[in-house]
Amino acid sequence: MTILIILTTVIVSVICFRRPDLLYKLSFNPYRMVRDKEWSRFITHGFVHADMMHLFVNMFTLYSFGRYMEYTFAAWGFPSWQFGEFEGGSWAFTGLYFGGLIASSMHDLFKYKDYAMYNSIGASGAVSAVLFSSFVFNPWGRIYLFALIPVPGIVFGFVYLFYCQYMAKNSRDNINHNAHLWGAVYGLLFPMVLDYRLFFYFISNLLQF
């Protein structure tokens, strides 16, 4: 499932680099969503990105943590979905990723529903959900910054959120930086909603620093 999402996102994003008209049709535009009921933008905005760096960072993070979450959900016994002979990712991972896209955008839907010119793009909310969901299972796992500097995952996550909130207040790049925060909240809560025992599992692991 992770690889399928990455391939689709890369293809659609690259096409949209040369097609600003298509990028606009797929972007998150609360005004059009509310007025014209274009609810599909909740999902489609996650398949387009501002530039190659934006695309690379999101897809690299998704590749690094998405597969881990698929394996982890499977290990915890969450069922997979199937189409004939093809077995895809678990329902849990599907709900985590696409639910993250929606949940991370709700804040801006209400905030900007009367602003016709507001648009945002990127899978950041869903990727943030996947990243922070991994902390439920392994909060002190090491993330290597620049492939050299080991940082506990949960420490990196909160520094990352601080940076994103700064960018949300100071940038004008059409990237939905607010989505990182709400995606993170969704990602932390989602596994615990699926199985309440994961709350105690998370707290137990968190205290073992």
Image (cartoon, rainbow, N blue to C red):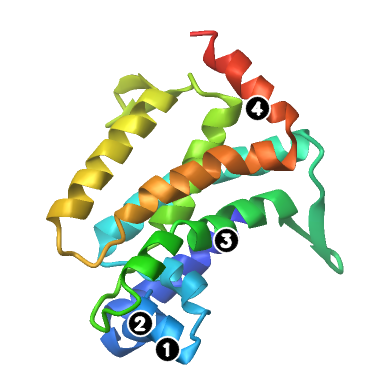
Which class describes the residues within 10 Å of circle 1: few (<14), some (14-19), or many (20+)? few
In front of the other: 59 or 32: 32
Question: Looking at the image, is mark 4 or mark 1 earlier in the sequence?
Answer: 1
User: In percent of the image, x 43 and y 54: which residue is there?
Assistant: 125
Q: Could you tell me if the residues under marks 2 and 3 are in contact, i.e. CB atoms within 8 Å?
A: no
Q: Could you tell me if the residues under marks 2 and 1 are in contact, i.e. CB atoms within 8 Å?
A: yes
Say which element carries label 3: helix
Q: Residue furthest right?
A: 84
Point out which mark residue 98 bears.
3
Query: Label 4 amino acid?
Result: Phe
The relative height of residue 150 versus residue 105 in the rendered view (above or below) is above
Q: Could you tell me if the residues under marks 1 and 3 are in contact, i.e. CB atoms within 8 Å?
A: no
Marks 4/1: CA distance?
Answer: 39 Å
Question: Looking at the image, is mark 2 or mark 3 earlier in the sequence?
Answer: 2
Marks 3/4: CA distance?
Answer: 22 Å
**In the rendering, at what x and y percent does residue 62 appear?**
47, 48
Marks 2/1: CA distance?
Answer: 6 Å
Question: Looking at the image, is mark 1 or mark 3 earlier in the sequence?
Answer: 1
Which residue matches tag 1? 35
Marks 2/4: CA distance?
Answer: 37 Å
**In the rendering, at what x and y percent does residue 40 appear?**
52, 79
- Quadrant where the N terminus lies? bottom right
Q: Is residue 176 visible?
A: yes
**In the rendering, at what x and y percent does residue 98 appear?**
57, 61
Left or right of residue 188, residue 20 in this image? left
Query: Label 1 amino acid?
Result: Arg
Which residue matches tag 4? 199
Question: Looking at the image, is mark 3 or mark 4 earlier in the sequence?
Answer: 3
Q: Residue furthest top?
A: 208
Query: Label 3 amino acid?
Result: Phe
Viewer-side label of 3, 4: 4
